[in-house]
Every structure is written in C-alpha cells, then in structure tokens.
Image (cartoon, grey):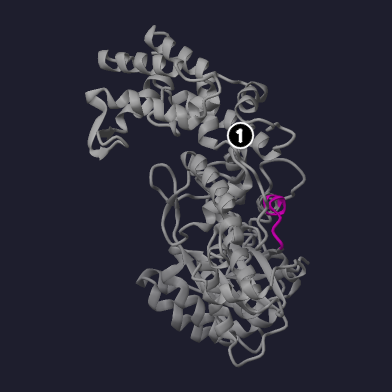
Amino acid sequence: MADASSNMIDLSPEVLAAAEESRAWPFEEAKKIVARYKGKNYPETVLFETGYGPSGLPHIGTFGEVARTTMVLHAFRVLTQDKVKTRLLCFSDDMDGMRKIPENVPDQKALEPYLHMPLTVVPNPFGGDSKSFGDHNNAMLCRFLDTFGFDYEFASATEYYKSGRFDAVLLRAVECYDQIMAVMLPTLGPERQATYSPFLPISPKSGRVLYVPMKAVDAKAGTITFDDEDGEETTLSVTGGRVKLQWKPDFGMRWAALGVDFEMFGKDHQTNAVIYDRICTILGGHAPEHFVYELFLDDKGQKISKSKGNGLSIDEWLTYAPTESLGLYMFQRPRQAKKLFFDVIPKAVDEYYSFLSAYPRQEWKERLGNPVWHMHDGNPPVVDMPVSFALLLNLVSASNAQNKDVLWGFISRHASGVTAQSHPELDGLVGYAIRYFDDFVKPTKVFRAPDDVERQALQALSDKLGTLAPGADSEAIQNASLNVARQIERYQDQTKKSPEGGPGVSGAFFQMIYQVLIGQERGPRFGSFAGLFGIPETRALIAKALAGELA
C-alpha cells in the first residue's frame, strides 16, 4: 500500500506561515479538512478518495481527479506539519453492469452477449494480459498514474464487495432500507418509483446486474427477495458480492464503510451530493468534504465521455507534450469549464516552463500560489528552457525539419553551449514539437500570396535584416522589423506611440508575416523566431514568398 506520508516535504517556518495565508485552491480545500477535525483527534489515517468508472477507456478527466486530489493532500500535510497519516485511494466502480457497448472498442458485436454483466466479467476486447474489460481499463489507469509518480492505492469494487469489506455496511443498508428509500424516491419520476430499489442483485443464473423491484427485504436475515429474469422468485444475501448498490446509494455506502474524508467530483454530480451525504449519514458515516470541479469539453464544446472517446486520451496528450504540462492544465481554474483538445497543448507547455522559471525569484507567498509548487509536492525542479514550444513549432514549420538534428543545428547556433546533452528537457520538447507539427499544424497550414503593399513591406524587411550584424540578437531583429512597419501607413497604429513619439505598429504587420511566410494566423515574437531561425534563412524564406514558391 502506498503511503503519501512517506514523502519528505518542506516544513520550514516560511512555508508554514505562507501556507496559513495561502488562497490557492488546494489550500482552501485542505483547510476544510483541518476544520473538520478542529477540537477532535484525527483518525489513524485521513482518507482521500477518487472515483473511476471503467465503463470506457480512461480519459484525462479521470487523471485530473487524482492529480488535483494529490495537490489537496499535499497542502493538508503542510498545514498539519506532516503529523497526520494520509492515504489516497483510487476506487474503481468495476462491478457496475455494462449498460451499453462503448463506441471506441474493437469488435463491438462480440460484447453484445455480455450487456449488463459486471465490467470485471465482460471479456477484454483489446487483447493483452487483462482478463476482463474492467481489468483492462483499470490497468490503463494505473499504468499512467504510476508513470506520473502518484502515491496512491488502487481499489476494485469487485474485490471489495466479494471479499466482504462492505458486508457490515451492506447489512446496515438492509436495516435502513426504508430510510434509504425515503431519500431516493422523491428524486425519481412516478414510473421509476414503482420499480426502484437501492439493491442491484447479480443474477445467479445469467450473471447480469438486475434492475428489479424488491419483493421482500429481511433485515434480520440480511437478504433481499426478487424475481429473477426468468420470473423465478429468488432470495440472496446482500453480502459476499452477490448484490451491489445503485450508484447514488453506493457513493454514500462507500464513504461510510471506508471513512472517506475528502472526495472531489465533476459538476454533473453536484445535485446528487446531498443524496450521497444523507445516505452516508444514515449508514453511520460522516460525509466527506467535497470539491466540485467543472467538466472538460471537446473541440465542439461537448462534455468528454469515456464511452464516446471524444476529447483527449492520456496517451494522446503525452504523445505531444511532457506530463508536467498536463499537471498544469489540471491545476488551473478547476471550477471553470475548459476545452480539452489538441490545440490547448502548446500553451500549456509554455506556461508550465514560464511558471517554473518564475519560481526561484518569488517570495514564499507567491511560491505557494505558483502551480509548480503544488504539482511537484513543494519541490519544483530547476530546468533551463531557452526556447519555447511555440517557437520550436514555428522553427519546424519554417525549416521543414523532419528530425531533431535539423532543429538542434538552429538551436545550438542561436544559444551557445546549449546541446541535447546539456538540456535533455529541451531535447524532449524538440521531439514533441516535430510530432505535434506533423499531426496538427502541417495539415492546417494555408499560405497566402502577399498583395502589393505586403510585397513592399516584406522586401523592406528583408533589406533591413540584411543591414544587421550576422550575430544580431532577437531584440535587434525585433526593433528592425518595427522600424520597417512604422514607415508603412497600413501598419501604423495611432493609438500607440513609438519611442521617437511617432505612431506605433499594428499587430496586423506580424500577422501578415506569419500568414505569408509560415502559413499560420499567428506565431511567437518575430525577433525571437528570426533570431533562432537565422537572418540569412529568414531572408531566404521571404524571397521564396515573393517568388510565389510558398503560396
């Protein structure tokens, strides 16, 4: 079992003082748990839980729950000076019946005979070592969580139900059947009320999870009686994995059985949270502290779904960016709905390294609000990233680079002493940039031919660049380009002022450069791009555009 308390954390007076004042959301949530036990003794272990429904392949939203919960757990350890043992449990509801066949699995027809059977009984359609569909999806989740270095314990509903770990609370649920029904029935329509039961028996004959009304509930015997699919009256004990609970009562039962102190969930659960809490209380538990986060959306603004496979998978993000960029995306604005698709990746990458660069210069109050402090358990690494991801993407575009060596030729010339060996993180980013460009940027590139004014502007820019010293830095290149634009009426911005007091430069000038030279709507700072690409190479690119070789 992984124990989160085994990791050393910084408990210096400066950190503790900043933590008490911090308004970063992980600290705000951790303070709720501290208040939960104010005036009381902490339990042997404060339990943080995350839930996973393996009805479809894991997506980043699932990972996000673990990442964010880990951040709250670390903040709690700091606030309690690491004197309280903590535990993170990732719980998979893999005993749930497969109500529909996911759209993103191979050979969907082969799974049809297993509809409504527990996910850990449905055969694994993907091949490999996992015996069932549920086992396969659980393994995919754990593989990533292990890769990212999370300190957690995985739990399977199937194992917990069948091993008897829930038996005592399930027997309590039989005793409190009427109370549970009194909570649930008002939330249902008339038709559903007539057949609803919080208990879902597993048919001894078909193996399917049954949604059937109860004919009898015997608190003394701990049994339920119902009609099986063939109409035969059947009585089962609620213990030993013969029966599971409907998902809403199951939340409350699990919290009561395990003594969960904190669990976050998506906004789609928000209206049900009061139901989970009430059932937990009925079963003798103390409902945990909650944190409700907004849902992730795909590129069309639709909620991402495991069964549909829309949005991004964990593996897809990691094909194009380092894991840290994903951690940052999870930290930022968790209560705000965010698009989770490929075009968010470059910004997340560059923002991560920007926060990392700022961290050493910050006071402790700012550090504890910096995402990298929370992402790295208070110990962010020291990484020198001399070239941004956005700049690398434009360099790939301009140079048509197909391998790392080509890009490193430009980088090493631009940044003296910077090599793949001295900067392994940058070397990794170079590989990501090539893959991202090939798959997402290149297919959408649309070059356009310059009009007469733009041709004159580009020629003037090339001529001006030709007057610069061979080793001119990015600032000199940027200033030279601004001086060219200020002389052209189309690109003058009267709302801005140049250092000499004349008109400033409109952003349309640089947008034109990227549209004509790179085939994109926008790019990083032109001086930085041309400095990295090289002045002769930039002039040659302009010449190609003027000769009609790009559009």
The secondary element bearing badge 1 is classed as helix
Q: Is residue 148 magenta?
A: yes
Give the residue type at disc 1: Tyr
Q: Is residue 362 above or below residue 129?
A: below
Instruction: Say which of 208 and 544 sits in front.
Output: 544
Where is residue 69 shown, x and y percent of the image?
59, 65
Task: Determine whether 435 is above or below 289 in the image.
Answer: above
Horizontally, residue 347 falls left or right of residue 419, namely left
Quadrant placement of the C terminus: top left
Most common secondary structure along the magenta stretch = helix
Which residue is the site of mark 1?
432
Q: Residue furthest front?
A: 500
Q: Nearer the viewer, residue 490 or 317?
A: 490
Which quarter of the picture shows residue 231?
A: bottom right
Q: What span is in magenta?
A: 143-151
Residue at (45, 71) in percent of width and height: 272
Indicate whether residue 302 is drawn in magenta: no
